[in-house]
Image (tube, rainbow, N blue to C red):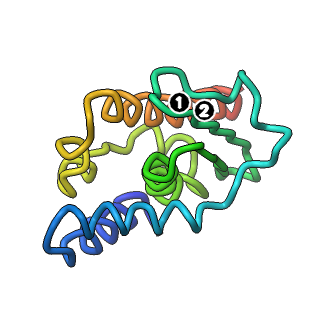
């Protein structure tokens, strides 16, 4: 699936819920199914700066796809990073770089997060794009 198709699928899933309590529960559920980062990658280097809770993100390239794993010490944050990993993992670096993140606004996520969590969300996206940029420039050399 393309990034856009995955984003549309997520928007559809969120539109099934009537209120934000149900959406929060769904986000927490998604976090429980997050493929966890290996303990060896839970380092200071993989810690996302700007997040209220601890979030570790690790990316590696497998053939021409970028594979992300992550973890967080907060259940809601773990769900948020799970949504991002579902969207961007197993995609080409150049596609990740070109992708917009409008689907975040479409599901209303940013407006239903505290200011610090919203900043953390932006930091998570930035880190994902940084990995993609690093792999994309490595691919072109």
The numbered dot on residue 71 is: none
Label count reads 2
Q: Is residue 133 above or below residue 98?
A: above
Say few, some or many: other residues with alpha carbon within 10 Å of mark 1 (under 14 / 14 to 19 / 20 or more): some
- Given this view, does label 2 or label 1 mark the residue nearer the observer? 1
**In the visual, does 71 lie left or right of 26?**
right
Which residue extends farthest bottom? 16
Question: Foreground: 109 or 103?
Answer: 109
**In the visual, does 101 lie left or right of 54?**
left
Which residue extends farthest right? 40
Residue denoted by label 2: 131
Say few, some or many: other residues with alpha carbon within 10 Å of mark 2 (under 14 / 14 to 19 / 20 or more): many
Q: Residue 39 in the image: x percent, y percent? A: 82, 44
**Point 47% across, 35% down: residue:** 124
**Point 68% across, 29% down: residue:** 46
**Point 85% across, 39% down: residue:** 40
The numbered dot on residue 127 is: 1
């Amino acid at each position: 699936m393309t990034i856009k198709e995955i984003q549309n699928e997520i928007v559809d899933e969120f539109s099934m819920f009537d209120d934000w309590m149900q959406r929060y529960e769904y986000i927490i559920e998604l976090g429980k199914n997050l493929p966890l980062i290996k303990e060896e990658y839970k380092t200071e280097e993989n810690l996302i700066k700007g997040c209220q809770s601890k979030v570790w993100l690790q990316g590696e390239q497998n053939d021409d796809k970028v594979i992300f794993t992550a973890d967080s010490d907060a259940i809601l944050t773990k769900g948020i990073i799970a949504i991002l990993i579902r969207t961007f993992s197993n995609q080409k670096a150049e596609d990740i770089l070109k992708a917009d993140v409008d689907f975040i606004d479409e599901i209303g996520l940013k407006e239903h997060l505290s200011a610090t969590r919203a900043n953390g969300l932006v930091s998570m996206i930035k880190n994902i794009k940084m990995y993609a940029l690093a792999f994309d420039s490595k691919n072109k050399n």
